[in-house]
Amino acid sequence: MLRIEKIDKESDFPRGLTREAYVDFLYKHLDRFGDPKEAINKCIDYAFFDNPMAGGFLLAAYDDDRLVGALVMNRTGMEGYIPAWVLVYVAVDAECRGKGYGRQIVERSFDYCDGDVKLHVEYDNPAKRLYERIGFTTRYAEMRYKNTR
């Protein structure tokens, strides 16, 4: 049975799990769809920011005592015109995929959100099908401009 623990601040990391190990887990299991460890750490810093217009939380999922999944959710502070929450990272140990852990982790995260949730996913990411089955829909194509000025 999957056990999912919520982490609201640095001191909430469960015994035996450090922030560094959590970041390493995300970095490894996000694989080519992830970001550098520095970016993951910044996202966690934001999640731990104590401000009603910011902040967020992390989830750590365990099968017995083994970390098998991780999620980072950030508050956008822009509810009303974009969703209140952004699911920034979710990863499941590559050896544990296909057991429904990803769905359980994402759905549990909704219990802690007081508004709509958005996420960004690359079109070729196999997890896109999971997000659609959960109920995420495509509303916009994201476009970015790289400012070199």
Image (cartoon, rainbow, N blue to C red):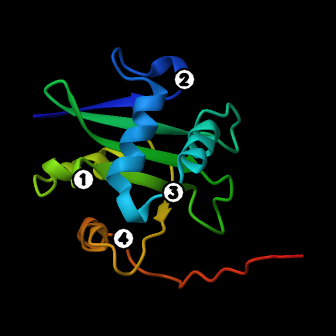
Q: Residues within 10 Å of mark 2 (few under 14, many from 20)?
A: few
Kindly identify the amino acid type of the residue bearing the numbered disc 1: Gly
Instruction: Work out whether residue 110 can be spotted.
Output: no
Pointer 4 with pointer 1, Cβ within 8 A: no
Cα separation, mark 2 vs mark 4, equals: 30 Å
Q: Please state the total of marks drawn on the protein image.
A: 4
Write the residue at 36% across / 70% down: 136
Q: Secondary structure at mark 4?
A: loop
Pointer 3 with pointer 2, Cβ within 8 A: no
Q: Left or right of 65: which side holds 11?
A: right
Cα separation, mark 4 vs mark 3, equals: 22 Å
Q: Nearer the viewer, residue 10 or 133?
A: 10
- 3 vs 2, front mark: 3
Cα separation, mark 4 vs mark 1, equals: 14 Å
Q: Residues within 10 Å of mark 1 (few under 14, many from 20)?
A: many
Q: Left or right of 44: which side holds 135?
A: left
- 4 vs 1, front mark: 1
Q: Quadrant of residue 22?
A: top left
Kindly identify the amino acid type of the residue bearing the numbered disc 3: Asp
Residue 136, placed above or below residue 51: below
The residue that label 3 is drawn on is 35
